[in-house]
Amino acid sequence: MTVTTALPSAGEAAPEENPWARAWRRLRRRKGAMVALAVVMLFVLMAVFAPLLSPYDPTATSWSLVRKPPSWAHWFGTDEVGRDVLARIIYGARASLSAGLVSVSIAVGIGVPLGLLAGYAGGWIDSVLSRIVDAMLAIPFLILAITLSAFLGPSLTNAMIAIGVTATPVFIRLTRGQTLSAKVEDYVEAARAVGNPHWRIALRHILPNIVPPLLVQASLAIAGAIIAEAALSFLGLGQQPPAPSWGSMLNSAQRFIAQAPWMAFWPGMAIFLAVLSFNLLGDGLRDALDPRHK
């Protein structure tokens, strides 16, 4: 018995590529975004494996090693009380990345449901939420974060909450706009016509289709959250001594910028690289997830 296998004809359409596989293929073609992704992963690994990578205890002081320049023993030098700067940079990545991820998670967790509600329900709910968002966006981001952090009290946890609440209006407005565009599409009208309840239409049909712009905004918001955490720690409202933070390291270094410039250079470079990498990654994701790009 002979078994024959039907071959697809020349005019037959090829199977449709998975959207996330297509986005990954597009992202890999963007060298800047891939370099940024590698740097982000390097910072993540540095934060996760800090106890294994750190050559010294980041809080151990030594009065015989005060403000020593970079050497083979201390690659990034030491600070004003003899603590190893490299060890503090490595452990400081935990505070900065945690602040970025946790605060953006708070903003997404609050902003996306409220934006979805405002965009889908409309009416007075949309009006009230839009006026609240407009009022919060009228205040500069960092000023509002400083005010909330000062009200809650100085700590890294309170700084994360303050940054997350401050970033929430951006996600409310973005989600609302995307929902207003999506709810008039044919697939939503079809889902409504067959009798799907409103909550199912919003969660099963609209939300999955607005994830790409939210993902891009989240990556960009992490960069802003890292800067905000560094600013709050610089002002004494974030990570509290002696726990390391890139912002608090800059605060300590400002008094010795002429005698020990390495104290300010390395935490400043860490903030610069982390923020630049998340911004470049966000730009790459925006292009990769845009259906208009090939």
Image (cartoon, rainbow, N blue to C red):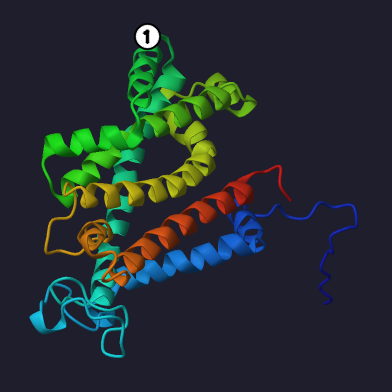
- Quarter of the figure with residue 9: bottom right
Identify the image quadrant of residue 42: bottom left
- Residue at the location (46% across, 47% down)? 220
In this rendering, the answer to whether 246 lies above or below 207 is below
Q: Residue at x 40, y 29 (%)?
A: 172
Question: Is 133 left, or right, of 236 in this rendering?
Answer: right
Q: Residue at 90% across / 57% down in the picture?
A: 10
Asked which secondary structure carries label 1, the reply is helix
Is residue 78 or residue 144 the one in the foreground?
Answer: 78
In percent of width and height, residue 222 lies at 39, 49
Residue at the far front: name it: 258
Above or below 85: residue 195: above
- Residue type at mark 1 is Trp
Number of numbered discs overlaid on the protein picture: 1
Q: Nearer the viewer, residue 262 or 194?
A: 262
* Residue 41 image offset from top left, x and y in percent: 43, 67
Q: What is the crowding at mark 1: few (fewer than 14 residues within 10 Å), some, or many (at least 20)?
A: few
Question: Which quarter of the rendering shows the N terminus?
Answer: bottom right
Q: In the displayed structure, does residue 160 sit left or right of residue 269?
A: left
For the point 27% across and 84% down, which residue is it? 74
The picture places residue 35, in percent across and down from the top left corner, at 55, 67
Q: From this viewpoint, which residue is outermost toward the top?
A: 124
**Between 256 and 41, the one nearer to me in the picture:** 256
In this orientation, which residue lies closer to the viewer: 13 or 41? 41
| Residue beneath disc 1 | 124
Extreme residue toward the right, this view: 10
- Image coordinates for residue 53, horizontal then vertical, percent: 29, 81
With 60 as the anchor, is 111 left or right in this view?
Answer: right
